[in-house]
Image (tube, grey):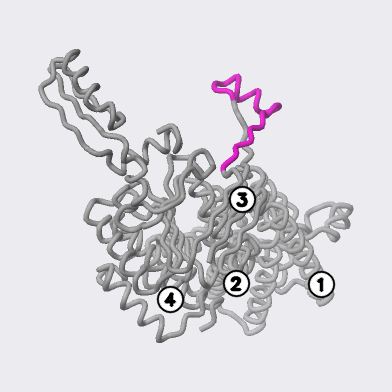
Amino acid sequence: MIKINSLTKNYTTYIKEPGLKGSFKSLFIRRKKVKEALKSVSLEISQGEIVGLIGANGAGKTTLIKILAGIVFPSSGEVSVMGFNPWERNNQYRRCMSLIMGQKAQVWWDLPALDTFLLLKEIYEIDEKLYKENLEFLSETLMVKDQLKTQVRKLSLGERMKIELMASLLHRPKVIFLDEPTIGLDISAQKAVREFIKSYQSEFKPITILTSHYMEDIKELCPRIVIMKEGGFVYDGPLSNIQKMMGDEKCLTVTTKDSTFKLTIPRLELAAKTSEIFQNHDVIDLNIHDPSIENIIESIMKYGLHST
Amino acid sequence: MKWWAFIIASEMRKILAFRFDFWVTFLGQSFIQIIISISLWKSIFESRESQEMMGYSLESIVLYYLIVPVGSKMLTGENIGFLSREIYDGSFNRYLLYPISFFQYKTLTYLTYSCFYGLQLIFIFLSYHILSGGIQSEQLINLLAGFIFFFMASVTYSQLALGIELISLWADNIWSLMVMTRFLCFFFGGAYIPVDFFPQFMKDILVFTPFPYLINLPIKVTMGSARMEDLFSGTVALLVWTILFHLGARLLWKKGQYHYSGVGI
């Protein structure tokens, strides 16, 4: 189980004025800027749950994951993952946890994947039988059996991501942090990774936190989502509730001679607004539909939950 | 196999992964060093019309400067930036995720490179003696002792380098600091000029620093010109400095880990 209580993280950065003058000035005077990456957030996740963490760039998703993985220290607050304090970096905790970052390679580029796996087998003290079993299961499910003896740097982006996934799951972790695992992958590779995560989740029931900018990942994998905005949580609940919450609204896509525009309006104002549009514009086509999850989440990320 | 043996094996695999670079480093550099060292010092001695320079004969100074480049490489192991680069680009994350000590991991990878250059040292030493008319058993014992001393010195230097590189947890770029440290170690260690050439007052001061034990002493051991008391005092000095540098690096890590943000390229 993961328990997060009033977790805060502040980063200190330095501001440098642009240009040569600014560069010289920064040699003597530096202006500090404190950025609140996480603002007193609290959360509970049970064993076997998979939670989607979504938010715009800089919302604090990766910071939260790094704290949970024990890479960075929080400024304040409490965290317990499977009863461990992550930043104490207890070896027992590190043996049951895994972090996969789509934008950062963790396997060694100059070695074939199998060499890395053998090293990880020793580091994680994986039993020979379990190692063989996992290697077989992972390489078959991810369809990378033929790539295991090739230097990782010579593999395609999709293949490398699959190797990263394999390397992170060899020790069969009970807690998995997936930070944008499908970033930069083509549609079929994204689908394969999603399918794999789904089958791994149903087979081994780990706690999984997934961050992604692709709504397909979230829709396919996460029954529960947490939406982050500027370091805070603006929504934590079932994905299915999102559409229900916005049930009082309708989306209009209007095509005129000159342009196409979209509107989200209250259901009760639909008739009045539609006739107003027909009066004021030369309408060619008008389409009325329920707002999509993507639109709702985008709106929540921009304006928060109450002002959508 | 234990995890530490696997780390050494993996690092060796990385070194061997690029065969062109491997052969250029191993054979190309070795022969270039032999040729340059012999021709340079031969011409210096001929121009001076002298058989000896500060107690060094032509053969011994050639051998000294033959050992210096590869001995220095053995000392500096994985070389400058082996840790600060990873802190800078965020790939340091992996060591925080693995259930092992990153100090042990990085020291092991560092020493694997030292051992690789140690093989090159053996190769150059043997090639030089074979080319100059054969090798004696006493020289082989000196070579073994020299290898051990260079290895001990590289353990000391690895802890110093670890500490210096950990400063990058506060300052993003510490390249100049690392270059400066290496220059000081090389200069006062006798890589550019043998410590025997330094004025006496300087030699008296250097005894209390780690520098002469890092390069000068291992070279003298390899050449068979070190005295028994030098071996003893050198071993004690290297041990003491290793402990001090290690404790310093641990302190820096203890304080600096709060500054690590795991961001990068």
* Residue underneath mark 4: A118
Residue beneath the point at 60% across and 22% down = A22
Q: Chain of mark 2?
A: A
**Quick one: label 3 or label 4, which is nearer the N terminus?**
3
Q: Amino acid at mark 4?
A: Leu
Residue furthest to the top = A280
Foreground: disc 1 or disc 2: 2
* Residue underneath mark 3: A7
Q: Is residue B108 left or right of residue A146?
A: right
Q: Are marks 3 and 1 on the same chain?
A: no
Residue beneath the point at 89% across and 52% down = B201
Tell me the CA gap for discs 3 and 4.
Answer: 37 Å
Foreground: disc 3 or disc 2: 3
Foreground: disc 3 or disc 4: 3
On screen, B65 above or below A10?
below
Q: Amino acid at mark 2?
A: Asn
What's the mark number on residue B236? 1
Residue beneath the point at 72% across and 50% down = B184
User: Magenta segment range?
Assistant: A17-37
Is A3 in front, or is A38? Answer: A3
